Image (spheres, rainbow, N blue to C red):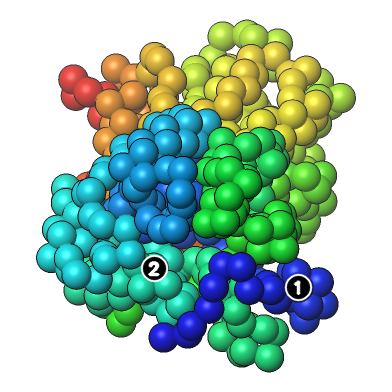
Amino acid sequence: MVTFHHTDASTPEESWLDAGVGQLPLLDARLLAGASRVVVLAAHPDDELLGCAALLAETERLGVDTVAILFTGGENSHPRSPTVTPEQLAELRAAEFEALSGALFPSARTVHPGLTDGRVAESPEAVRDALDAALAGCDAARAVVVSPRHDDGHPDHETLGEAALAAGRALGATVLEYPIWYWHWAGPEDARWRSWVRLPDPAGLDRDALWALYPTQTRPLSPAPGDEAIVQPDFLAHFLRGFETFEVTQTDRNEAAQAHRDEAALAHPDAARVFDQVHQDDDPWRTYTSAYEARKRATLIGLLKEARGGRVPGSDESELGRGAGADDGGSDGASADADRPYARAFEIGCSVGALTGDLTRISERVLAVDASAEALEQAQAKQGGRAGVEFRQMLVPESWPEGSFDLIVLSETGYYLTEADLRATFAKIAASASGGGAVVALCHWRGDIEGWPLDAAAVHRMARETWPGERVASHEDPDFLIDLFDIAGPSGR
């Protein structure tokens, strides 16, 4: 184990920055968004602020189930203090931790095993029991355990790091190790840091204000020798750099868990943020200008019209395929006829509204939803002037509209859902079919889908398994799949 003292000169922060620590790759945001639970291990009060304040702020923002385990009271941080006893210091530091947790991660559960500061290694069973209890009742393969590094140079830190890695190996949990004293005693020539990732501080994280909650560590307890501040300014500089670093460890067992985690990424309300970022660009998939998009929508609308019989208004591809902007004119709200055979359509995942515009040609009313407010703003601008169109922000299947529909469309959206959420979506679709039944339309690109739970083949296979006898039309283009199902309403026909 490395030997050092907190009063030793710390490696200059400029050395770390010049070496490129600020250019490390980013932590995959899906790791936290898809976690079943995040368990944070801290040996002493302030370890959580030193090593993972940004992470705790992010789990709080995401609403991820979080447990913070503070193993000791930090009572021996000033062993030669002539003014404060260890018992008194434990009380002071407990109050500091309480204030910090209330400010940074108020929704997390906190656990205090009450081990002795500096002697955590003497209680391996207590460490293991606390970690097991924190992980109980969750999908451990999707859990994230956050701990000090197993080679940080402090015996308490290293004990927790080793316990976290053992849990990761045993349960398939992902382990994020955070360095604390490493920045103090190591230098850029030590290559370990080059394989780590970083997590930027989220907006609003005020580290100076948070450090003001730990005066026993940042200020002298008194002018007397032995009461010096533990966190010296040159050491603290490593933790005011605007980001944190972690080593990510995922065992072989965790490969399956990673796939599950990727599936869960967009089941989380954070999907709105993900797609808001995508829609910073105007029409990111070029749905209004792409020949592929025009051909796909023309084929889909033609099949939907045939499913109910009749002519498609504007059925030449020059008009139909281009998503009919608001300036093209819209439905006058007349009653359903041969040209507009559907009464109420529900479009799941409308993006910027290109297909929505085409659906108004065959349905009197269209409710179009998307997780992204940015997407809906573009859709409203392009299609909001059309009669019978309503846009809503909604994350399916967690949220679902009221009422029934005789047309429900899932286009280029199914592969963003987990298998469980797609099945839940199908169940809600079935429950939302109008009394006379509904046509359910699925349309998806057949290309490789990287980083998402499913692909077109999987989505359509699941739909065919859900409604094995109700498929009324299919189209297998080299670029896309379309399936139409004519399903009965909840009470049957």
- In depth, the one of 49 and 236 nearer the eye is 236
Residue 423 located left or right of residue 122: right
Number of other residues with Cα within 10 Å of mark 1, as a class: few under 14, some 14 to 19, many 20 or more:
some
Disc 1 marks which residue?
12
Residue 126 seen: yes
Pointer 1 with pointer 2, Cβ within 8 A: no
Q: Amino acid at mark 2?
A: His
Nearer-N-terminus badge (1/2): 1
- In depth, the one of 297 and 6 nearer the eye is 6
Quadrant in the rendering for residue 116? bottom left
Q: Amino acid at mark 1?
A: Pro
Q: Which mark is residue 157?
A: 2
Residue 270 located left or right of residue 77: right
Question: Residue 36 in the image: x percent, y percent?
Answer: 32, 50
Depicted 238 relative to depicted 368: above or below: below
Q: CA distance from mark 1 to mark 2?
A: 22 Å
Depicted 316 relative to depicted 332: above or below: below
